[in-house]
């Protein structure tokens, strides 16, 4: 049975309210950190009654999880693959690693809100930070399972991607307020191109056949 106009309006209102609450979580986290996050603060920021947090999400923990799974906060597997998972799967191992680094850096640089939250996570630890970290960890492990397990190489790919990912996470977070690192201009595309070239050199050297 098709929805009545009233039900369609109600559904749109529900989606809009959910979106407001998710956006409010991100705004509070970026502005004040995790200690400021609570039912009253989120409801006030979203301009809605706090009872709607429980109605639509079940509570703050579930709302935070919904925020963490929102593609506006963290890149999806498809985004990390460059938007075309099938095409990415056909790349060589070196190309996959290079593109992953490039896509990951671009995804973070285009998410200033995410970078602010990642910075807060370094100084505030609680179950909410753990929840967001678990979501990110699950995404990257899914990515690894999808695209890297078939490659049989004498190299710890998980550790390699962890080192590259950690470097990019630090540099993108640092670039929020500090432009230079070791002479590299983190505020310019040219600076990031230099970093990508260095990453490609490392990858090529690690995957090179022994003489």
Image (cartoon, rainbow, N blue to C red):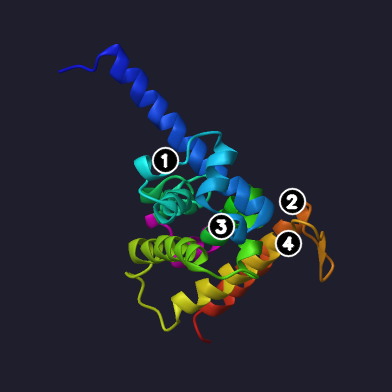
Residue 136 shown left or right of residue 192 in the figure:
left
Residue bearing the label numbered 4? 194
- Looking at the picture, tell me which residue is in the foreground, 32 or 94: 32
Point out which mark residue 51 bears: 1
Tag in front: 3 or 2: 3
Tell me the distance, in whole angstroms, between the alpha carbons under discs 1 and 4.
50 Å
Whether pointer 3 and pointer 2 mark residues with C-beta atoms closer than 8 Å, the reply is no
Give how far across and how far down residue 167 sits, in percent: 64, 70
Whichever of callouts 2 and 4 sits on the residue coming sooner in the sequence is: 2
Q: Residues within 10 Å of mark 1 (few under 14, many from 20)?
A: few
User: Residue 90, how many percent across, how many down?
Assistant: 38, 56
Nearer to us: label 1 or label 4: 1
- Mark nearest the camera among 2 and 1 is 1
Q: CA distance from mark 1 to mark 3?
A: 37 Å
Q: Is residue 9 left or right of residue 209?
A: left
Q: Residues within 10 Å of mark 3 (few under 14, many from 20)?
A: many
User: Gap between marks 2 and 4, in whole Å?
Assistant: 9 Å
The answer to the question of whether label 2 and label 4 lie on touching residues, with beta carbons closer than 8 A, is no
Q: Which mark is residue 104?
A: 3
């Amino acid at each position: 049975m098709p929805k009545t106009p009233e039900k369609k309006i109600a559904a749109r209102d529900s989606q809009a309210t959910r979106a407001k609450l998710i956006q409010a979580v991100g705004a509070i986290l970026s502005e004040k950190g995790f200690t400021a996050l609570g039912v009253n603060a989120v409801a006030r920021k979203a301009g809605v009654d706090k009872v709607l947090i429980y109605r639509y999400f079940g509570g703050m923990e579930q709302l935070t999880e919904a925020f963490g799974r929102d593609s506006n906060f963290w890149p999806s597997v498809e985004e990390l693959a460059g938007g075309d998972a099938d095409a990415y799967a056909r790349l060589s191992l070196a190309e996959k690693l290079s593109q992953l680094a490039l896509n990951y850096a671009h995804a973070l640089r285009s998410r200033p809100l995410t970078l602010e939250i990642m910075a807060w996570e370094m100084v505030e630890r609680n179950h909410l930070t753990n929840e967001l970290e678990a979501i990110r960890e699950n995404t990257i492990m899914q990515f690894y399972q999808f695209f890297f397990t078939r490659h049989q190489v004498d190299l710890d790919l998980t550790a390699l991607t962890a080192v590259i990912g950690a470097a990019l996470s630090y540099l993108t977070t640092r670039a929020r307020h500090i432009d230079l690192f070791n002479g590299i201009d983190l505020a310019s595309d040219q600076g990031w191109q230099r970093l990508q070239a260095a990453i490609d050199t490392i990858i090529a050297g690690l995957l090179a056949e022994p003489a």
